[in-house]
Amino acid sequence: MSRRLAVTGGAALAALLSFPVLAQQGHDGPPPDHDGPPPMSAEDQALSEALRARMGDTSTLMQSVPIPESAAECGDTPGYERMLCLIGLLKADIYDDDILKNLQHDYSLAEAENWSNLPAGAFPKRPGVLLGELNIKQRGLVKAIMLEATGHAPDEGFDEMIQTLNADDYINTVSTDYKAGYSSYNTKFAFLGTPGESGTWELYYGGHHMAFANTYTDGKLAGATPSFRGVEPFPYFEMNGRVNEPLTQERDAFATLLSSLSEDQKAEATLEGTYRDILAGPQADDAIPESYEGIPVSKLDDDQQALLLTAIETYVDDISAPEAKAYMAKYTAELPDTYLGFSGTPQVSAENDYVRIHGPSLWIEFSLQSNKSTNKVGNHPHSVWRDRTDDYGGQTE
């Protein structure tokens, strides 16, 4: 069966309760030629039971949580040194051995690959401490750490993360499925490897519809991907004192780009088949095809190439500005060998609308699919940014 047809249908929430560990296809459930979610191993069952004992259903209110005064000890010069200092403050403030154990892990690629778009209760293998297990001061230090690693533009970087947390808090108000873990309380935060001036470690932040994975080697960013974003409801909702509209900027950038294409260009950019989800999602690290499909970016005029770069920036700007600038320079240099493809409508507003950018390094996907968590008619996006040269910081073990 083709990967592009692998995700369809809508698994009942009961499936999440019976089988917390699902395939990478997400809320849509297993492929249509599969009898159902796979049975859990004894190890997975134990993980699930242990996690459920820790989960909560309250909001972490990360947008309004204050950064503690102690953060001033780390100075006000942004960058890696300040982030290490803040990490030291966070660890020093945690006296619970279990929380420290969940926060700090040894680095392994296998552990780093344990990210997902699923809610907490449906993927207990995620490493990390739950945000809700930390006190307000500690959450404030997590906020300060993430602000060092992320972009600060509206609807990008840390602001996008806040809005994704708010989405889970919103779902918690309309869902009766507590065991799925719909709450910002249940987002995970971890260090894979020991943060420092030397060695390799990953800043891991993940939860429902969110995966952030900055890998550092010897004090430098070695990779900012895989980077997954999704949200439901879409395109906007009100929660925690604000209007939230994450991923509308990505959708709008793609729609503007595709609408600029001539009819001949649209025909060449159109991909065969229907895509009901992204290909290179969680536990699908080998899903990026070697062959290119769509229209070569070299066939786009200067204005259209500028629109394509704007779309790419909505992903790259999720990390800090200096590091985003380096990625954009690389992807701009690779434009002559990059391809644009889409399936569905160029407005990127209907179910199964799908957009892809595929370059020598760059892989971006944006997919609209039917709602799964809110029981409301409509669609919601899954989206991923991957870099084929430095996913997981280029680590192999």
Image (cartoon, rainbow, N blue to C red):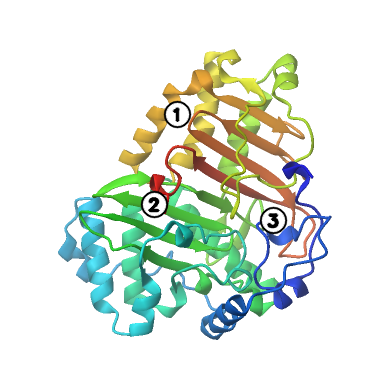
**Residue type marked 2:** Asn
Determine which residue is flagged by label 2.
Answer: 214
Residue 325 is at least partly visible in this image: yes
Q: Name the quarter where the C terminus is drawn.
A: bottom left
Q: Earlier in the sequence, mark 1 or mark 3?
A: 3
Q: Is residue 287 left or right of residue 74?
A: right
Residue 135 is at least partly visible in this image: no
Q: Earlier in the sequence, mark 2 or mark 3?
A: 3
Do labels 2 and 1 touch, CB within 8 Å?
no
Determine which residue is flagged by label 1.
Answer: 331
Please tell me how crowded label 1 is: few (under 14), some (14-19), or many (20+) other residues with Cα within 10 Å.
many
Q: Position of residue 307 (x, y in %)?
A: 54, 26
> Tag 3, which secondary structure?
loop
Find the distance from the CA under tag 2 to the CA under tag 3.
Answer: 23 Å
**Residue type marked 3:** Gln
Please tell me how crowded label 3 is: few (under 14), some (14-19), or many (20+) other residues with Cα within 10 Å.
many
* Nearer to us in this view, 255 or 128: 128
Find the distance from the CA under tag 2 to the CA under tag 1.
Answer: 18 Å
Do labels 1 and 3 touch, CB within 8 Å?
no
Determine which residue is flagged by label 3.
Answer: 25
Q: Is residue 268 left or right of residue 128?
A: right
Find the distance from the CA under tag 1 to the CA under tag 3.
Answer: 28 Å
Residue 253 vertical position relative to residue 20 in the rendered view, above or below: above
**Residue type marked 1:** Tyr
> Which mark is nearer the camera, 1 or 3?
3
Residue at 59%, 83% (x, y): give it. Answer: 49
* Nearer to us in this view, 77 or 13: 13
Q: Position of residue 85 (x, y in %)?
A: 21, 62
Q: Name the quarter where the N terminus is drawn.
A: top right
What number is the disc on residue 192?
none
* Residue 202 occupies quadrant: bottom left
